[in-house]
């Protein structure tokens, strides 16, 4: 671990302690784990190095001048008043132009290498749709629809795996940002942007919406779960199945399907086919609720269904005013959706 990443890690811990709530650490930008993030990281190191050099030269000359030429006791005369020096003026015009040129070319090269990448034939294709305030992930080739948790295979030298993301928005502008995997790319209504990632380390990478998109922008969190090819295959196989149909939850299922939940949410293999809210077919396979606002535990699920506005004020899921019986049945049914 570099000292930079240690400082960033410490900052996350301090921030989490200060806000005293569920920890949503921001991914460490000094620890890139995919090619696009790495190229952004290298570019930023170059920019920081150039800026640091300029600072040292300017601050050094300034300090030297202040100390060396300061007024001394007994200095009666005003110093010689000099105006203009062609050599110095040319130098301080040409050098900054060269510096800007170098930074522009380095930036253009990084942008072009990332943007011009063609999707290999075997790339995983995912459509990401930003909603106020959650993420929809569609895998068109696999027939999978999920929310807030993007699963992708790890990319190794032996088996490179690239995931191409098509970015769209259902409402306002959002921005997809998983600092350890890539730079930010906006999701804009009536337009399709794209980006790609090739994560080379398994694990969960946290990200968030990086474009102010309304009241709950800060709670539009996402996680990218990078899995071994075997685990990814298992995940896709489970997600492709219709939602589990537990005969012991028949009553709970009927209760859920009779409520207006189905106008906004889909559960595969049932009459619930709404598309305004997250697909619930495999809700229990996800780690968090409300786009990362609380961990997906039985108590939290109950609290969320009871009054989502208390947990994420302003989100588009209303308090359904369920009576205690209905609440029990809805939670019982949702808990069975593995
Ligand atoms: Cu979506 Cu900010």
Image (cartoon, rainbow, N blue to C red):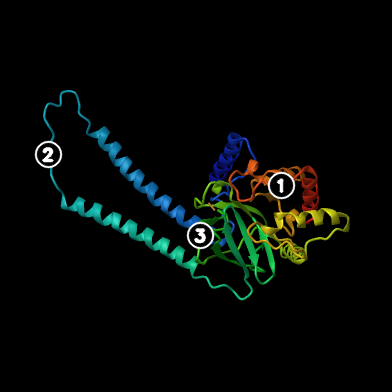
**Upstream in sequence: badge 3 or badge 2:** 2
Q: Quadrant of residue 267?
A: bottom right
Q: Residues within 10 Å of mark 2 (few under 14, many from 20)?
A: few
The one of 276 and 95 positioned closer to us in this rendering: 276
Q: How many numbered marks have been drawn onto this rendered protein structure?
A: 3
Residue 77, x across and y down, in percent: 11, 29
Q: Is residue 294 left or right of residue 2?
A: right
Asked whether mark 2 lies closer than 8 Å to ligand 1, one says: no
Residue receiving disc 3? 185
Alpha carbon distance from label 3 to label 2: 54 Å
Q: Quadrant of residue 324?
A: top right
Q: Residues within 10 Å of mark 1 (few under 14, many from 20)?
A: many
Q: Is residue 88 above or below residue 199?
A: above
Numbered disc 2: secondary structure: loop
Residue farthest toward the bottom in the current orientation of the protein: 121
Residue 105 in view in this figure: yes
Identity of the residue drawn at 69% across and 66% down: 144
Residue receiving disc 2? 81
Asked whether mark 1 lies closer than 8 Å to ligand 1, one says: no
Residue 321, x across and y down, in percent: 70, 45
Residue receiving disc 1? 305
Residue 62, x across and y down, in percent: 28, 39
**Upstream in sequence: badge 1 or badge 2:** 2
The one of 259 and 184 positioned closer to us in this rendering: 259
Q: Is residue 158 left or right of residue 69?
A: right
**Upstream in sequence: badge 3 or badge 1:** 3
Q: Is residue 240 above or below residue 66?
A: below
Alpha carbon distance from label 3 to label 1: 32 Å
Q: Is residue 31 left or right of residue 141?
A: left
Q: Is residue 73 above or below residue 186?
A: above
């Amino acid at each position: 671990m570099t000292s930079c990443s240690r400082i960033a890690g410490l900052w996350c811990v301090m921030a989490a302690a200060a806000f005293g709530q569920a920890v949503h650490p921001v991914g460490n930008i000094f620890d890139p784990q995919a090619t696009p993030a790495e190229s952004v990281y290298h570019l930023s190191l170059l920019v920081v190095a150039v800026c640091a050099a300029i600072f040292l030269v300017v601050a050094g000359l300034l300090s030297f001048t202040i100390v060396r030429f300061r007024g001394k006791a007994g200095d009666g005369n005003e110093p010689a008043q000099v105006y203009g020096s062609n050599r110095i003026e040319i130098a301080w015009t040409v050098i900054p132009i060269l510096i800007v040129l170098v930074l522009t070319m380095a930036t253009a090269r990084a942008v072009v290498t990332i943007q011009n990448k063609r999707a290999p034939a075997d790339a995983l294709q995912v459509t990401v749709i930003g909603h106020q305030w959650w993420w929809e992930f569609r895998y068109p080739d696999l027939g999978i629809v999920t929310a807030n948790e993007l699963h992708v295979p790890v990319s190794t030298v032996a088996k490179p795996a690239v995931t191409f993301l098509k970015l769209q928005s259902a409402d306002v502008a959002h921005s997809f940002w998983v600092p350890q995997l890539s730079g930010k790319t906006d999701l804009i209504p009536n337009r399709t942007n794209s980006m790609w990632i090739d994560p080379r380390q398994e694990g969960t990478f946290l990200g968030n919406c990086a474009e102010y998109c309304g009241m709950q922008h800060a709670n539009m969190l996402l996680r990218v779960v990078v899995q071994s090819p075997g685990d990814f295959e298992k995940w896709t196989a489970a997600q492709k199945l219709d939602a589990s149909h537990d005969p012991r939850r028949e009553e709970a299922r009927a209760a859920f399907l009779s409520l207006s939940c189905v106008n906004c949410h889909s559960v595969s293999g049932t009459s619930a086919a709404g598309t305004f809210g997250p697909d619930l077919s495999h809700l229990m396979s996800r780690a968090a609720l409300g786009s990362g606002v609380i961990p997906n535990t039985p108590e939290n699920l109950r609290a969320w269904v009871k009054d989502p506005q208390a947990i994420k004020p302003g989100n588009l899921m209303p308090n359904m005013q369920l009576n205690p019986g209905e609440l029990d049945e809805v939670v019982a049914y949702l808990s069975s959706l593995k």
